[in-house]
Image (tube, grey):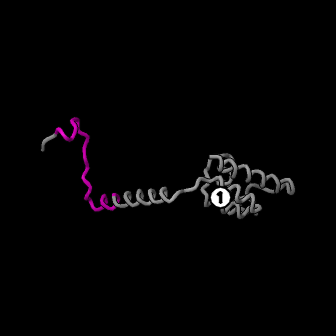
Amino acid sequence: MYEQIAVQKTLHEKFLEIKMKNPHYSLRAFSNKLGLSSSSVSEILNGKRRISIKMAKRIIQKLELSPRERSNLLELFPKKSKEDVEEIKKTKNIIQLTMDQLQKGSILVFRKRSKPLKDLKD
């Protein structure tokens, strides 16, 4: 969460820094510089949109921050361990398998029963 606030603050500071030099500088111009839509930049600045690490890297590159500022911002983003990545891959594979089965019609649909399954005799 803190990484979101830090990127938001950095964007705001850079925008104000440019605007101080050129009072006619607009949010639209700033958005174009970042390669984002003006609505996206507005949502980020207002805390209504989260920033992925991928987007943060793109923004940081466009802002021409010093290497130290870059690393300080990027270090705030949570790191994914190998276990986390593997768990995400497994979950995606299970979801894909389930969707494939559903499309083939091989998944049985269970209805809610009033008795536990072990007590039922079929």
Which one is nearer the viewer's eye here, 51 or 73?
A: 73
Q: In this image, 114 relative to 13: left or right?
A: left
Q: In this view, does 70 lie above or below 121?
A: below
Magenta extent = 98-119
In x, y percent, where is residue 16? Answer: 80, 52
The furthest residue to the left: 122
Q: On the rendered image, what quadrant is the C terminus found in?
A: top left
The residue carrying pointer 1 sits among few (fewer than 14), some (14 to 19) or many (20 or more) residues within 10 Å by Cα, namely: some
110 drawn magenta: yes
At 61% from the left and 61% from the top, the residue drawn is: 54
Q: What element does badge 1 sit on? A: helix
26 drawn magenta: no
In x, y percent, where is residue 70? Answer: 71, 59
At 82% from the left and 54% from the top, the residue drawn is: 17
Which one is nearer the viewer's eye here, 118 or 113?
A: 118
Q: In which quarter of the image is residue 15?
A: bottom right
Residue at the spot of label 1: 56
